[in-house]
Amino acid sequence: MPGDSEELPGSATPLSLSSAERAILEQLRAAGAEPLSEEEVGRRSGLAGDVVRGSLQRLRSKHLAIVEEAHTTVLRLTVRGETAHGEGLPERRLLEAIVRAGSIGPTDAAWTSLEESERGAAIGVLRRRGLLEDGMPLCPKPHAADAGVGREEEQALAAVADGRAPPSEPIVAALERRGLLRSDRRSHKRWLASEEGHRLDLAPEGVAPIGALAPGMLVSGGWKGRPFRPYDVRASVPYVRGARRSRYVAWLEEFEEILIGLGFEEAEGPLLETEFWNSDVLFMPQDHPARSIHDALSVEGIAGRLPSADLLARVAAAHEGRPLPGESSPLGPGWGSPYDPEVARRPVLRSQTTAVSARFLASRPTAPFRMYAIDRNFRRENLDAQHHLEFWQSEGIVGGEGINLRHLIGLFRALAEAIGIRELKIRPSYFPFTEPSIEGYVRHPRLGWMEIFPGGVFRPEVLRPLGIDVPVVAWGIGVTRLAMVALGCADIRELFVTDLGELTGGTD
């Protein structure tokens, strides 16, 4: 028992209620065994919704209220789904236009009225269902007009828009894969007073409960007739956080675990590279604009070391369009200019982790193989929401007999799905060292579509000088931008925060 002070012992935590908590607990007790939703609690107590939610959570932490929680999954239309619901699916609109006109070519209005992504998807659906003749212009097969294409899908979109149950789970799954529907998981909470909440002796309004007895109260008898404030011996003590990892670094480690789970092995390379490994071995011409001071960051005062004479000669032959040593025909026309070994030995800060892939392939791995690297790169960039002088890439290659571009696209989709990204666009692109090449775009909620998944199939001019004779697909994922989408960050500079409050757990 304390001495002259009314203060509580340092190790005791009083169970006190605010006026809002008291009012809500009274409503829960009055409801008995009938659980109440947060909205019903607010209506009965006359309190605002945010006050009700906060007070209920505090009552729960004090073991005076319990919650029954149920989860439901609600389908809703995406932006593209709303467009398809209002205008019709692109495959139906395109087929109807083809049937009306007899044939449609790239210059016809019905063709140009569809967006490029819609047009490709529509043609793919119609060809898979055998409704179009081969070749261009697009011509319908005789039974195409009666196929009823898109009817069931549009009925499902209409049902979701009206809040009705869609007709078929396979159709719903197909529409989700196309990005027309999405599933939202919703939580429904209903609250009850706990046994302790029912037993708690609530003091009359305006009467403060006694937290501790002082000698003066015992002498005067002022404690008589007043309620005592109970103690909750289970209440948690304050938790002090120490330093913690940056959320960006933690996310990179999670992404790395995904790659390891897919069977990839890690490789590393130096941050200070030579032009040979950073660019030449990747069949980038020595006068390529990206190798100028406007992109790569050169290092002065030192000289880099060239690779073995044999490898240097093979790379030089590919650049100049000559046959590789020991071979009779060239791999291709080359770049039409002499290869300069002095350019190859110049040191630069690595501008792409594809240099790690080149070093890995030069070690002559035995097919099949899967390699990844997640590391820093440096480029001369203007700082803005999507660009930084220092950025991270996730490099990767897959090599083996039968490997092709479809494997790479499937891998991109698997990685996007693993981190919760549902919208992914794949488009053709160009890189000096891959052919064919693609780019994958991911939608950021505030910044729009961002190019994140570049990749392609390594050209023979890259593989043959390194002694690789199997197909190899490669990518250099912009994991910094990917982290922006996954972490809800609208500015790349937020990922490199130096605020001690953020780094030491001062804020969650």
Image (spheres, grey):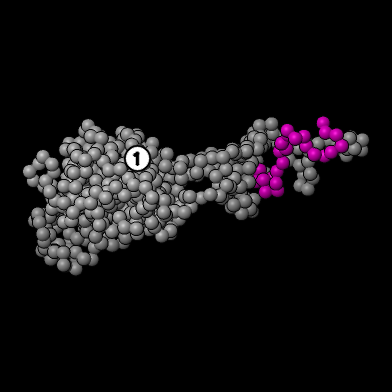
Q: Measuring 42% from the left and 39% from the top, which residue is drawn there?
A: 253
Secondary structure found at label 1: loop
Query: Where does the C terminus fall, quadrant-wise?
Result: top right
- The magenta region covers 1-25
Please tell me in which quadrant of the rendered image residue 231 appears: top right
Is residue 102 depicted above or below 45 in this figure? below
Q: Front-most of 439 and 166?
A: 439
The residue tagged 1 is 269
For the residue pair 243 and 324, the one nearer the viewer reads as: 324
Give neighbour class at mark 1: few <14, some 14-19, many 20+ (Cα, 10 Å): some
Q: Nearer the viewer, residue 470 or 262?
A: 470
Q: Quadrant of residue 445?
A: bottom left
Q: Is residue 447 left or right of residue 309?
A: right
- Residue 151 image point, x, y percent: 23, 54
Do we see residue 191 in this rendering?
A: yes
The quadrant of the picture occupied by the N terminus is top right
Kindly tell me whether residue 406 is visible in this rendering. no
Q: Does residue 95 appear left or right of residue 56 in this picture? A: left
Q: Position of residue 145 (x, y in %)?
A: 14, 57
